[in-house]
Image (spheres, rainbow, N blue to C red):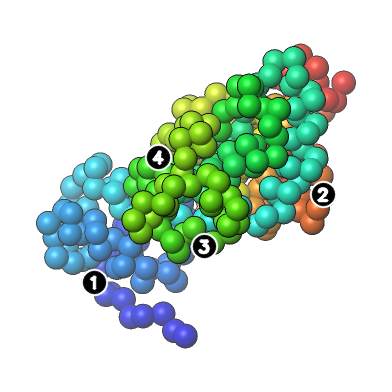
Amino acid sequence: MSAPPIDENVDFALLRRIVHARSQNVLDPSRDYVFEARLAGVIRGAGMSSLGELAAHLGRMRDPELECAVADAMTINETSFFRDRRPFEVLRKEILPDLIEARSGTRSLRMWSAACSTGQEAYSLAMLVREHFPTLTNWRVQIEATDFSREVLSRAKSGRYRRCEISRGLPVRLLARYFDEDGEEWVIKPEIRALCRFQWANLAISPLPVHGPFDVILLRNVMLYFSPEARSTVMGQAHRLLAKDGALFLGSSEQPVDASRWTAAFSGGTSYFKWRCAGCERNCNRRKCMAG
């Protein structure tokens, strides 16, 4: 099926540059046709009538608020509850039991959903903790969740989901246990919501609003939209924020930019990565370097 025709009078190169400058997302020219649909709300909100009018306005003058709205609308926010179940199974069976034993002294566990979209990934982690690890009830469990899109963060904070979103990946028993029905929507229960904190963040820009170390980082299906330079920055952030004995999960088709700083592990049909000091870098400030 061919792509729909696009208006050749629109400066799509300008729109792509704005998206990259604001979010570091790299958009392929072959998908210029998606601007029309994705920016329809932005166009209406700005009191304009067409994509061409929007692009012409942004070409004439700097409009930071409108530029951010364009980048926000063009951010891909595909997600679902327990998306690709294998990482969650590895967390349940192997990683979290080991971390719980290692953290028995501090009774603290911290996880980061780095591109949380509308919140399903963060809430999935919270349900996993409550469902399978009752010993953590009296622990300090924190799930930090960040995203570039303020619109999806607002939805994540509300914890409200339509039936079509609930049906994607959420087992019926968890729906009955951790959600309340409210008309046509389902609302996450306060006990799950309390474990999660949602914040805006641009992963490719420092400093981030979150602070390590994190025991688990989920950075899945994010880097494939970034330039090589942005990927390097994002992975550097992850390396800095991950606990030495923690676990990093990437998307199934993603790999670390600098393999010398990560040790790959494979279990349960999926891979994840452990922190490693590259030979020991001159600026390494870890008290116990894995290389030594």
Mark 3 against mark 1, which lies toward the viewer?
A: 3
Question: Which label's residue is closer to the chain start, 2 or 4?
Answer: 4
Question: Which label's residue is closer to the chain start, 1 or 4?
Answer: 1
Q: Residue drawn 38% across and 55% down? A: 185
- Res 11 quadrant in image: bottom left
Q: Amino acid at mark 1?
A: Asn
State the residue position of label 2: 266
Question: Which label's residue is closer to the chain start, 4 or 3?
Answer: 4
- Res 73 quadrant in image: bottom left
Mark 2 against mark 3, which lies toward the viewer?
A: 3
Tell me the SS state at disc 4.
Answer: helix
State the residue position of label 3: 167
Q: Which mark is residue 157?
A: 4
Cα–Cα gap, marks 2 and 1: 50 Å
State the residue position of label 1: 9
Q: Amino acid at mark 2?
A: Phe
Tell me the SS state at disc 2.
Answer: strand
Q: Amino acid at mark 3?
A: Ser
Residue 138: x and y in percent read: 63, 21
